[in-house]
Amino acid sequence: MKRLFFILPLMLPLAATASTLYKCTEESGVVLYTNQKTPKKHCVVLSHSPAPVPAAAPAPGSRPRASATPTPADFPRVSGSEQKTRDNDRRAILDKELANETQHAEKARKALQEAGNQPADKLQTLRDTLALHERNVESLKKELGSLR
């Protein structure tokens, strides 16, 4: 059963392009999921679908088309000043979160430095905590950088 969890994600790209998916069992009992039937193994068809038609690539230099569905007349609209207020609120929230995550990262860094001769699992937990806060800081910086 564990093998299925490791093999299945690898098969998803195959399932998107292949027309037939087989479950093959070797004489030793090993199960293989594939899009190619093997004569030396007992194979059963799991799914069969027509191959997808690839989308046409846009011409070089062409602009993307506007949505085919127009915006409904009763669709709620936001004024420019209200949107600016919302954007400013978002920036303030992100700035506060960045300050909090930076502070948590510094505390985690200090705790790791002070850990000394702690057991390996304790040190790993501290390293994982520090890495988490550092990733959060980078994500928040990226998000702030993408604001208008």
Image: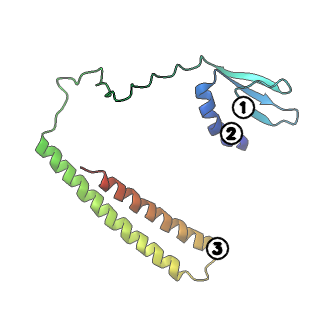
Apparent side of residue 84 relative to residue 107 in the rendered image (left or right)? left
Residue 62, image x, y percentages:
33, 27
The residue carrying mark 3 is 120
The crowd level at tag 1 (other Cα within 10 Å; few <14, some 14-19, many 20+) is many
Q: Earlier in the sequence, mark 2 or mark 1?
A: 2
Indicate the amino acid at tag 3.
Answer: Ala
Q: Is residue 66 above or below residue 94?
A: above
Q: CA distance from mark 2 to mark 1?
A: 8 Å
Q: Secondary structure at mark 3?
A: helix
| Callouts 2 and 1 close, C-beta under 8 Å | yes
- Other residues around mark 2 within 10 Å, as few (<14) / some (14–19) / many (≥20): some
In this figure, which residue is indicated by the disc labeled 1? 33
Question: Residue at position x 23%, y 25% from top?
Answer: 71
Residue depicted at 51% across the width and 82% down the height: 114
Q: Give the Cα separation between the discs numbered 3 and 1.
A: 39 Å
Which corner quadrant of the image does residue 7 belong to? top right
Q: Which residue is mark 2?
A: 7
Outermost residue on the right side: it is 27
At a point 33% along the width and 53% down the height, the residue shown is 143
- Left or right? Give the position of 41 relative to 58: right
**Residue farthest to the front, as pictured:** 60
Camera-nearest label, 3 or 2? 2
Residue 95 shown left or right of residue 10 in the figure: left
Q: Callout 2, which amino acid?
A: Ile
- Image quadrant holding the N terminus, namely top right
Q: Which mark is residue 52?
A: none
